[in-house]
Image (spheres, rainbow, N blue to C red):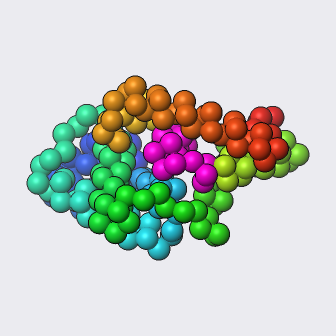
């Protein structure tokens, strides 16, 4: 039998659905950072993000136990879809679907990007500043545009996956990205921000 580390997320999900709690522990350790980062990006409040993260996993557990997960080869996408729905439900109930204002202690500053940069310290510092500026500019985008940018560039989702996760058409996802890029370029010119990585 394969070890936990060798198993795919989908295999672990199906094992958990069959009652193997250790499989879920492994799934949680694999997906928690990426999923939590997505939630923080959307709600801009770490305490709230913790609550919504827990609610997301509770819903996932219930769906897994009820046999509502089938191996489609995209467990992380399935989890992102659940998180997206939890966030939307929260905004509907509490915020009346208003765009959340960026807080002063914006958690987007804490995204871990240094690991993908080259070891050269000077280049790394320039790139970190560019990514910091991009995250700051993203805060000014409407929620739907910010979400598609985050999913595409930070979660590396295809436009088809983004469309499915957010419950819109591919054309709508592409349109949101187009307007997000137009807005980011405009904002970068207004604030004299260089968006070129070295």
Residue 114 is inside the magenta segment: no
Residue 165, x across and y down, in percent:
34, 41
Name the one closer to the observer, 198 or 138.
138
Name the one closer to the observer, 44 or 55.
44
Q: Residue at x 47, y 74 (%)?
A: 47
Q: Which residue of the protein is positioned furthest toward the bottom in this rendering?
A: 47
Q: Residue at x 58, y 62 (%)?
A: 102
Above/below status of 24 relative to 69: below
Above/below status of 115 relative to 158: below
Quadrant in the rendering for residue 28: bottom left
**Can residue 60 be seen?**
yes
Q: Residue at x 43, y 70 (%)?
A: 48
Name the one closer to the observer, 167 or 64.
167
Magenta segment boundaries in residue numbering: 138-154
* Quadrant of the rendering where the N terminus is positioned: top left
Magenta-drawn stretch, dominant element (helix, strand or loop):
helix
């Amino acid at each position: 039998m394969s070890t936990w580390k060798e198993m795919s997320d989908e295999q672990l999900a199906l094992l958990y659905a069959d009652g193997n709690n250790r499989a879920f522990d492994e799934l949680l350790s694999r997906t928690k950072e990426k999923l939590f980062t997505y939630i923080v990006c959307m709600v801009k409040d770490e305490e709230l993000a913790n609550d919504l993260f827990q609610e997301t996993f509770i819903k996932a557990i219930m769906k897994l136990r009820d046999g509502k997960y089938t191996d489609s080869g995209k467990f992380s996408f399935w989890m992102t879809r659940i998180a997206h729905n939890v966030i939307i439900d929260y905004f509907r109930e509490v915020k009346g679907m208003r765009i959340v204002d960026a807080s002063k202690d914006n958690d987007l500053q804490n995204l871990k990007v240094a690991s993908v940069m080259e070891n050269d310290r000077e280049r790394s510092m320039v790139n970190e500043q560019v990514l910091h500026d991009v995250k700051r500019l993203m805060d000014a985008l409407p929620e739907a545009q910010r979400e598609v940018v985050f999913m595409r560039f930070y979660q590396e989702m295809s436009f088809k996956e983004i469309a499915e996760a957010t419950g819109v058409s591919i054309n709508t996802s592409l349109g949101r990205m187009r307007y997000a890029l137009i807005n980011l370029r405009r904002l970068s010119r207004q604030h004299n921000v260089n968006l070129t990585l070295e």
